[in-house]
Image: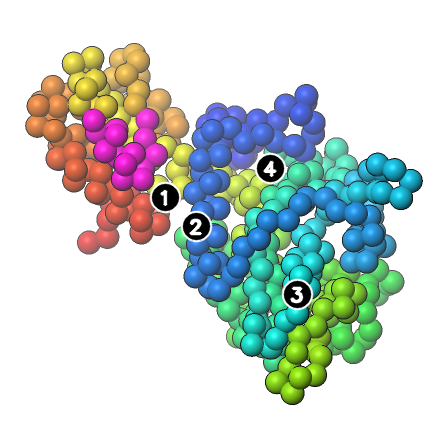
Amino acid sequence: MIDHRRLGRELDLFVSDPLAGAGLPIWLPAGAAARHAVEKYVRELERRAGYQHVYSPPLGKRELFALSGHLGYFADEMFPPMRLSADDEFVLRPALCPHHALVYRARGRSYRELPLRVGELGGMYRAERSGVLGGLSRVRAISLNDAHNFCTLEQVGDEVREILRLIREAHAALGVRPAGFRLSLRGPGAKYVGDDASWARAEELLRTALDGVEHEEAPGEAAFYGPKIDIQIVDAAGRESTLSTVQLDFDKPEKFDLSYTDPSGARRRPVLVHRSLVGSMERLFAYLIEVHQGAFPPWYAPVQLLLLPVDAGQADAVARLARRAVDAGLRVEVDAAGSLGARVRDASRRRVPYVGVVGAREAAADAVALRLRDGRALDPMPAADAVGLVGAVVAARSAELLPAG
């Protein structure tokens, strides 16, 4: 069976060391390169969609999370407070929304600024039991692609529909294949904040935004502060989990006394839309490693082009080609140790999308012979053309290995 933990070890993507602690994986250079490419893509996708990115600390005073409701409704999944003095306790945050509420209230807001979309790829922490931890799919330190969109009630429908469009765009680029959409609703019990009218209104807004989208309803799966749309994935073992999410929240704007000035000058409450396009980097890559079997699309492959000189006589030519490819923005390595056959086999094991072989004839002509990950071999071509070919596929974020057309 395909298992991201085994592939992670074989491809040197991440390591879990008992000395670091369970649920605290360390991203190795190859995994970090792939992750950085995905993070860069998501930030740029959000920037073009009107998001403003912030940085906020991964911990805060105990009072912050008491106000947000996390200590009252989420304490079992939080790490214990850290006491610095009798009246100074800090908590590792289990979510980013309290800090983003502070971003909103950093100054007065007008209706002209709404929707205000605050994005961050930030750290948060969950005190998961050791028995449920595994690889990247369930961890204690989480790097979440998160955002909080503050808008008027009238803007909610359009905002949610646009978020769903962005989720589809990101999934298509990454190769995510959603297993289904779920409308997670309030269930029985006292684990929810807010009044019945607010919940009914929030649930109906999300139901309307899903009009025409096939989905199932899941009572009891809502967040403690509001209903949500969850986009589900299924891993190689058949386990279902949530990757992307959109959540409505009337509670935190009230708790944090958030407001904006409407056209008449009156003070109004915004609605808070929580959303994540691709979820946490950990769960995302647990899925991507398995669904691609380690052979990532070229645009976020750890090494995009591996150059192999046939012998030492091509060292200078390969060094010049490597510099040209690096200057073009590609992730490049040179492997000159051992027989050519062994190096080609190792490149295949590593799932490198492009291998460039340079022999005496290619070096003399400033050329390279490209071999593709799927086994195809291209005729030798000018080095500049080879760099352009790989660059075009990467720029297009294509899953194919050759440019379209």
Residue at position x 79%, y 47% from top? 61
Q: How far apart are marks 3 and 2 (CA)?
A: 30 Å
Q: Name the residue under label 3.
A: 107
Tell me where the magenta segment starts and ends, as one range.
320-333
Amino acid bearing label 1: Trp
Q: Residue at x 64, y 49 (%)?
A: 56
Kind of residue sitting beneath label 3: Arg
- Tell me if label 3 and label 2 are in contact, CB under 8 Å: no
Residue picked out by circle 1: 299
> How many angstroms separate mark 1 from mark 2 (CA)?
10 Å
Helix, strand or loop under label 4: loop
Say which mark, if any, is on residue 136: 4
* Disc 1 to disc 2: CB gap under 8 Å: yes
Depth-wise, is mark 3 or mark 2 nearer the camera? Answer: 3
125 shown above or below 320: below
Q: Which residue is drawn at 61% across and 31% down?
A: 25
Q: What's the CA distance linking mark 1 and mark 3?
A: 40 Å
Q: What residue type is labelled 2?
A: Tyr
